[in-house]
Image (cartoon, coloured by chain):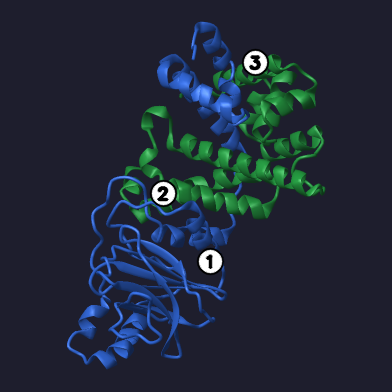
Chain colours: A blue, B green
Amino acid sequence: MSTGPREDGEVRDLLGAYALDAVDDLERRAVERLVARDPEAAAELAALRATAAELGAASASPAPADLRAAVLAAVAVTPQEGPAPVAGTASAADPRGARAGRRPGARWLVAAAAAAVVALAVPSSIAWQQHERAVVAEQQAARLADLLAEPGTQLVRADVEGGGTAVAVLADDAGLLVAEGLPEPGAGRTYQLWAMRDGVPVPAGLFAPTSGAVQVAAEDYEPGDGLAVSVEPAGGSDQPTTTPVVVLIPG
Amino acid sequence: MAAVARGDQQAFAALYDAVSGPVHGVARAVLRDPHHAAEVTQEVMLEVWRTAVRYDRAQGSVRTWVLTLAHRRAVDRVRAVQAQRDRDQRVLDGEHGRPFDVVSEEVEDAMERTRVRGCLGTLTETQRDAVVLAYYGGRTYREVAEELGAALPTVKSRIRDGLLRLRDCLGVAA
């Protein structure tokens, strides 16, 4: 492929249109190649972009007031690209301590009570630092953002027994589990999601985290339900057969 | 911005307060629909959070970076809406088929009392039309050429020369 002076000149003429997003995909790539190898073109593009930004800034108008809270809540559960930040401070409401030493049968209730303590009013700040590099698909982020923007949505956050952090996003029409840092469930075992309806776990689907991370909607969900997760034999169970690793009940 | 890239949510909240108005303004100017504009604003701010490490100081200010993302998203949305409309063969109000002078007037209203407006006035009329249609109208330069009945190379130069003149007038540092 030739990149002679004539072609470069033609591509350079596109810098203005490129800075205004007014080119097609082929032209966009041509400009990006030029800018990558030609510092002068790169400098011109930087100036043109800064100028275009002035056009944008000139039309500033306050964003809708409710958007701020929705965006900040979404940010609290959205992983970033790039180097991992320092791990967040431990949650003061870690339900693990409360569960220790109880009989397995009672743990569901105790865990539910502990989770209720950390239930957060939407959309107050959630201290959920990211522990590892992760990129959530944009669609998932959009889905999450939609749910977070709904007026009645509640967030419940808790650490997961055995490792990781989980947030339940409980809207009127959907319940979403977003978790990170989960260990592998082990050979012949699977994570199972439960909808917690009046204290009773209802099967809500199986899931397998990718690099410890997962975003999954409860297959069975009614408004007011909480969510819980347990590790079950492959194929899942009708009733939990182990102590839940996390229980997230709305406040 | 470095703090945002490290996952500092308070720093992000401060950034949101600083740039959400301009981002929303760009989205509204291009999309002309409050619902789409709010959605695009939300998408852009989440993109800023997720991709904060990609911000490169050498390429310009944070505001320029964020508004570049915002304009691209808004334009993508306009074109998606347009494509949808073409597929559906139904005519939606607003969006694309507005006469040029309407776009122009609305933009002028929004920009009153700003030096940007003054500087747009230093462009030739043909440069100004091309820049305004491309930036605020979300048109490609081909669509601009069609709309203004001008040749493609002419429109390319008008946009570039117009922006360069605007840069000089505004005293924009890259």
Front-most of B64 and A186? A186
Vertical relation: A66 (above or below) A229: above
Q: Considering the numbered disc 3 on the image, is that residue within a helix, a strand or a loop?
A: helix
Residue named by callout 3: B157
Q: Residue at x 23, y 54 (%)?
A: A86
Amino acid bearing label 1? Leu
Whole-percent x and y of residue B30? 66, 41
Front-most of B39 and A37? A37
Amino acid bearing label 2? Arg
Give the number of the disc on residue B72. none
Q: Residue at x 48, y 52 (%)?
A: A138
Q: Considering the numbered disc 1 on the image, is that residue within a helix, a strand or a loop?
A: helix
Q: Residues within 10 Å of mark 1 (few under 14, many from 20)?
A: many
Which chain does the numbered disc 3 sit on? B
Whole-percent x and y of residue B142? 70, 25
Question: Circles 3 and 1: CB distance less than 8 Å?
Answer: no
Q: Considering the numbered disc 2 on the image, is that residue within a helix, a strand or a loop?
A: helix
Which chain does the numbered disc 1 sit on? A
Question: Circles 2 and 3: CB distance less than 8 Å?
Answer: no
Calculate the distance from the C-alpha at mark 2 to the C-alpha at mark 1: 18 Å
Whole-percent x and y of residue A170? 48, 74
Residue named by callout 2: B50
Looking at the figure, which quarter contains the N terminus of chain B? top left
Single out the residue that lies furthest toward the left.
A101
Whole-percent x and y of residue A6? 55, 7
Single out the residue that lies furthest toward the top.
A5
Calculate the distance from the C-alpha at mark 2 to the C-alpha at mark 3: 35 Å
Residue named by callout 1: A147
Amino acid bearing label 3? Ser
